[in-house]
Image (spheres, coloured by chain):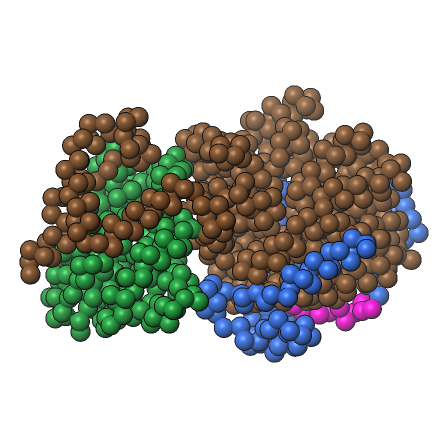
Amino acid sequence: MSERENILGRIREALKVNAPLPGWHGERSAEHLSAGDPAANARNLAARSGTASDWLPLVGASVAEQFELFAKNAADLKADFQLLASRDELKAALLKLRDAEKWRRVASHDGELSNFACKALGLPVLLTDRGYDVQEMEQCDAGITECDALIAQTGGVAVTSRSAGGRALSVLPPHHVVIARREQLVADLPAAFAFLQQKYTPDFPSMISFITGPSRTGDIERILVLGAHGPKKLTILCY
Amino acid sequence: MTVTLFIPCFVDALYPRAGISMVEILERLGHTVVCPEEIACCGQPPFNSGYHAEARAIATPVLEKLADAEAVVIGSGSCGAMVKNFYPELFKATRHAELAKQVAARTWEFSDFLVSKLGVTDLGAKFPHKVTFHDGCHGLRELGIHKQPRALLANVRELELVEMTEVSCCGFGGTFAAKFPMISTAMGEVKCASAAETGAEYIVSSDSSCLMHIQGLLSRQGKPTKTISLAEVLNHQ
Amino acid sequence: MSTFVSDFKTRATEKAGDLRHRQVIRTALRGYEIVRDKRKAAFQSWESARQAAAETKWEAVNHLDKHLEALTAKLEARGTKVHWASTGEQAREIIAQILRDKKARCIIKSKSMTSEEIHLNHALEKEGFTVVESDLGEFIVQLRHEPPYHLVFPSMHLTRGEIKDLFQKELGDAPSDAPEELTMVARRVMRQKYITADVGFTGANFAIAETGMISITENEGNARLTAALPKTMVTLIGIEKVLPRFADLALFLPMLATAGAGQPMTCYNTMYSGPRQPGECDGPEEWHVVLLDNRRTELLADAEQRDALHCIRCGACLNVCPIFRNVGGHTYGTTYSGPVGAVITPHLRGLQEWKHLSNASSLCGACTEACPVKIDLHHHLLQNRRNASASEPAFFERLAYQIFGIVANEPAFWSLAKKLGWLTQPLQKAVKGSALDPARAWTKTRDLPAQPRESFKDWWRNRK
């Protein structure tokens, strides 16, 4: 018998005895759960009062409130968020960044917004789409990507290997710049997951990443240091 | 109401003032207090060490004595948790299973009984000192008692309550204190340091067992902070 | 006494009295407590979220066979090779064989407690492979040749000065003891390792049955790079980590971050559903996922404690545990320390050898209160005590309780015992704390209360 069958066999044997329902001393009623049919349990869980959106941190209903929340959260995370009025402003913001950070070469990928950004910068660009040399990417000053969603609740962005130029582009260069459209803002995490699931089922990109602020560590005396292994800086330009 | 007062073994032997204060307070409120002499211990020490048969040997007569009580009041959060939460588990699938549930439902920790059952928060006490309150873990987390003692202390004249910044165990833990004395002592030292930070003269608690541990450390280290049971504070004029 | 318990007692006694250690841990955790409470308060209902998370984990674990089959089918459909390992030894061999097949030399590794559980690094190094831990904390403890101190904060027991000295000695590079500069040293060392490593190894936080994904949570970006650059990727995951639905992550990711580190979200939460897919520009050509049992099914078979498999390894129970805070992570001698370690280690490694971890608790319940998935931790410690005493009672301890029972149940004996206690007080005082003192375990560091002549019951009787 294969180990797969051995393990599944032990699991089935173990599950013949029902476990108490979750909560201390079973004092919490959880009548919607039973040890029987998993599909019924899933339906019952879905029908339970409230969803994750009702328990997670509050998000305002209007788009203006949500952008305000996004900006506040991004600032808490030490990410640089700029809400811009037009493509001209976007271009100006990029040029300002280029000069301030003294970029010489950037890495990016093919996309309507990322192409616009690269053209605006007027710098040599390493494009990842048809394969790239890792050492070269490591030498780039910034990785410029698009994204799938901005999440007001967390101040973070969701990217995938398909929307953001592969797996490495958003983590290898020392500065990650996300270019987004206003309509990409979603209220909360449940909305972001629902959006991604709807957008990609059944053919998911091999990587989906929720990026919430620049890379960080607290492993030395719990003191926050940015840029542990990933980007030290995260800029989100949204127009 | 006739209140059956269950005075735990160590309160009986070591802290009679706490028990006497409970009797006097309940009688002043107009209740009849009875104290079954045959009951000494709830059985928690063997239960917590995993010896359920030995725990049942102690708890069975307790349960039988309390069978007809209108209300059982226990002078300790820890022993209260034993009767309220752990008796039903200890007697599960025994002939006392139903009785254990019934008694558990009629059992109260002292401060919880005053506030939640009787609706009394002002006992007319006066205690002109700065105090801090230590929540015994069983009362706090098994029975969910937090507001009750504070509601009572709020009405004690000239008493100033300063809360500790850290909610932590005193390190007593029954036989744990003897089985792992150095861990227990370290936990007690952390607790004493938190209490000292408040500048309180007294550490007050519903649990005399916690106070025994805290006072034991304070005395040994020559610290001036004193300990006193909640019932004694509430009975102080 | 087994060596496990005597080692534990020796280390615990030493650490509990180590005031410097106490201060380091207290300082490290104080900041955590403040931000954790702030983040919890930001939830509209942390309690409802906990209950929902507990129920979701209950659903996952109580239909584990079905979820694992769904997960495997989805993973395999996109070209991932799934391996099943009943034991740590099997898992080590599966992983070593992948490395041999690939003629790999250097493995870059992101944080994985499951790999610590099966002592993977040791086994691979013995075969001549170079294993590099990329998480900063793990990198630091690897340089010190010691296991992680904490599930989530592996190097929290070290000060910046100690880390500076370590880097100076092992890497010859430590410009100062500033955390920023020390972190940059590790960053420089690691950058080339990602690029040159033959195999990237990762742990996992969740697996999603519905979509066939492995979800990895991290702050540093080291796991992202580990899963992006090497040609081969290997992921080791305990079978209990499965969640039913993709959408479940919307609740679990922020809860893990909040309970574990007081963050609203961990910096990178990444879901992998396969190796590099057609049309993608990077990522590993091969991905191997190793599903590990290693006696998890024994814990599963204990219905009473099955919820211990709900654990998401956030470390919240360690952070609030007064035992952990005073004895430290290394004292346990286990991969999983703190309350959850005390609960599960007897199942994973043997009850009689590891029951002392369940005894070394005041049962304060801070762990249960902190657990984001509502594992009944401190009651499980009680159940372990019960199971251990039932299968192998300690003769004298049981006898003592039997005698105590006889005394407590007979008022005349109880009265007599109190009298004797009162009468022998002066004797006890004379030998207090010495080797002759029967209460030495108590009196070595603590005074006993003075026993009054009149007990409560004496007073009650006289009054009537």
Please tell me how many numbered marks the rendered image carries: 0
Give the quarter of the image for residue A101: top right
Q: Residue at x 11, y 52 (%)?
A: C458
Q: Colour of chain A?
A: blue
State the predominant SS element of the stretch in magenta. helix
Q: Colour of chain B?
A: green
Q: Is residue C344 above or below residue B216?
A: below
Left or right: residue C237 compared with residue A165: left
**Camera-side residue of A231 and C26:** C26
Q: Is residue A201 magenta?
A: yes
Magenta stretch encompasses residue A171: no
B140 is higher (above) or lower (below) than A21: above
Along the line of sight, the residue nearer the viewer: C118 or B28: C118
Where residue C55 appears, x then y in whole percent? 58, 67
Q: Give left or right: position of C272 versus C459.
A: right
Looking at the image, the residue that sits furthest to the left is C463
Q: From the viewer's perspective, is C264 left or right of B145?
A: right
Residue A52 pos. (x, y %): 59, 69
Residue displayed at 89% across by 40% down: C101
Corner quadrant of residue A31: bottom right
**Most distant residue in the right direction:** A130
The quadrant of the rendering that contains the N terminus of chain A is: bottom right
**Which residue occupies 47% across, 30% down?**
C10
Q: Which colour is chain C painted?
A: brown
Q: Position of residue A33 (x, y in %)?
A: 59, 73
Observer-nearest residue: C210 or A68?
C210
Q: Quadrant of residue C220?
A: top right
Which residues are drawn in magenta? A189-202
* Residue A155 at x, y percent in the picture: 63, 58
Q: Do we see residue C358 in this rendering?
A: no
Between A216 and B97, the residue placed more toward the observer is: B97
Residue C276 appears in view? yes
